[in-house]
Image: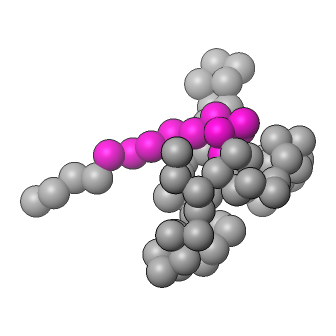
Amino acid sequence: MSEEKLKLLTVREAADKLERMSPYILRKMIKSGELPCVRYGRKIFIREDVLKEHFFGSDSAMSTVKDT
């Protein structure tokens, strides 16, 4: 049984991966409930797999997200 590591991104990191998306827009999407997030205290994190699924819809499009 293989376990994938869960990668959490800050809003800024998520915006950087999407290249043309601003952190402001991502925060608005989170506030409206459109984009799920994980909150730890005052910090907001977005799961990388959720980000890819939300914006690209399938695993086949994951290569279009900029890897850092």
Q: Is residue 35 left or right of residue 7?
A: right
Q: Is residue 7 left or right of residue 38?
A: left
Q: Does the magenta stretch include residue 10?
A: yes
Question: Where is residue 37 shown, x and y percent of the image?
Answer: 64, 44
Question: Where is residue 50 shown, x and y percent of the image?
Answer: 56, 58
Question: Where is residue 60 shown, x and y percent of the image?
Answer: 48, 80
Q: In which quarter of the image is the N terminus?
A: bottom left
Q: Does the magenta stretch include residue 41?
A: no
Q: Can residue 62 be seen in this view?
A: yes
Q: In this view, does 1 lie to the left or right of 37?
A: left
- Give the quarter of the image for residue 35: bottom right
User: At 71% across and 20% down in the image, what residue appears?
Assistant: 42
- 10 over 35 or under it: above or below: above
Q: Identify which residue, 59 or 68, lies in the foreground.
A: 68
User: At 65% across and 67% down in the image, what residue appears?
Assistant: 54
Q: In this view, does 42 lie to the left or right of 22?
A: left
- 24 over 60 or under it: above or below: above
- 65 over 33 or under it: above or below: below
Question: Where is residue 31 shown, x and y percent of the image?
Answer: 84, 45
Q: Is residue 33 visible?
A: no
> Which portion, as a residue range, is magenta?
5-14
Q: Identify which residue, 41 or 63, lies in the foreground.
A: 63
User: At 59% across and 62% down in the image, what residue appears?
Assistant: 65
